[in-house]
Image: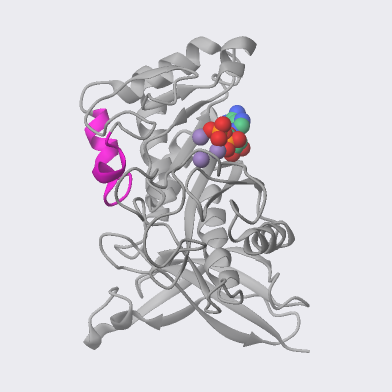
Amino acid sequence: MAYIAEYIWTDGTEPTAKLRSKAQVLADGKEPGIWGFDGSSTNQATGDQSDVVLSPVLVTPDPIRGGDNKLVMCETLLTDLTPHPSNTRAKCAASAEQYDDLDTWFGLEQEYTFFEGNAPLGWPDNGFPAPQGGYYCGVGSDEIFGRKVVNAHLQACIDAGIHISGINAEVMPGQWEFQIGPVAAPLVGDEMWLARWLLYRIAEDFLGPKGTPISATLDPKPVAGDWNGAGCHTNFSTTEMRESFEACEDAAKALGAEGKPALHIADYGDGVEQRLTGAHETQRFDQFSYGVSDRGASIRIPWQVEKAGKGYIEDRRPNANCDPYVVTQLIIDTVCSAAKS
Ligand code: ADP
Ligand code: MN
Ligand code: MN
Ligand code: MN
């Protein structure tokens, strides 16, 4: 029997790449191989030289179609099989390879917001719900919107073999989070892009209270004003950090070294300045600080890490719409080069 392989990739849209996918029917027993697409329709090529190559990097069971069907996360290549300019994975893989001996692990907390039409899911058409305060990890239909989609997504990620480690309802109604990891780069990025694709795809199948389909967005500031934005807190550790508190502090200091905060912020997702105002948890985008338990800092060292004297640290700055390949590559380069010097 033939099976269906859904090929998934990130496109060339600026400033934030979009996910694209298309399906290929493959004969039983045939592995998903190199394929291609029309790059002139995805901001990845001009019409006269439109072919872009899809090269599989992660193949999983397809939890939506089921059976023998597969999801195929890909990177994009030029026709000479070198990385396409929009391929951020290749650079991430090179950095991970360079510092292979430090064995960096990442745990990414992906926040996102459901919408129905023009309003966040469960919000009134006009006006606002009750202010933030009771929604985070809440329960009950007056506080929680979209749990069916969240649970379907969680199960789908598990069935696909993604290292999803949890979910929670967030501070703004209609806002949620899932966590991937800890996993090494670039795999953590492959799994994050695949989990994002599953989220968008699964939401298509659910209707909101107005009877229209639900969508999910990674918009870092989906509602202006006194509502938390959506981030992608990036937890990470090296072998040394998993053995010593001093190495955890050194990593936080390396991220604050001259020139590094601006370098990271510039690539932590479009609109990061609108989210990191300093008013809604996390330090302002143009200031740098770190501290134990401090959710107002750029970098938080969890209290359990201080207590255990080892573990990992949390970079709270990346936006929900960040590219996980870029964020993990920057952290590896900054922290591992400092650890080696
Ligand atoms: P928060 O309290 O910030 O909401 P979460 O529980 O949402 O924290 O996320 C913590 C993340 O830290 C998880 O994704 C987990 O996988 C990750 N994590 C735990 N230990 C490590 C480690 N040693 N290195 C990297 N990431 C880790
Ligand atoms: Mn979290
Ligand atoms: Mn959160
Ligand atoms: Mn966090």
Query: Is 265 in the magenta?
Result: yes
Residue 136 visible to the viewer? yes
Residue placed most toward the observer, 129 or 10:
129
Magenta-highlighted residues: 260-277
Residue placed most toward the observer, 29 or 117:
117
Q: Is residue 110 above or below residue 306?
A: below
In this rendering, the count of numbered labels is 0
Percent x, y of residue 117: 42, 73
The image quarter in which residue 297 lies: top left
Q: Is residue 16 above or below residue 262?
A: below
Image quarter hosting the N terminus: bottom right
Q: Residue at x 46, y 38 (%)?
A: 233
The answer to whether residue 314 is left or right of residue 264 is right
Image quarter hosting the C terminus: top left
Q: Residue at x 50, y 59 (%)?
A: 193
Percent x, y of residue 136: 56, 41
Residue 106 visible to the viewer? no
The image quarter in which residue 7 lies: bottom right
Q: Residue at x 32, y 63 (%)?
A: 86
Residue placed most toward the observer, 98 or 92:
92
Query: Is 341 in the magenta?
Result: no
Q: Is the magenta region chiefly helix, strand or loop? A: helix
Q: Is residue 117 above or below residue 183?
A: below
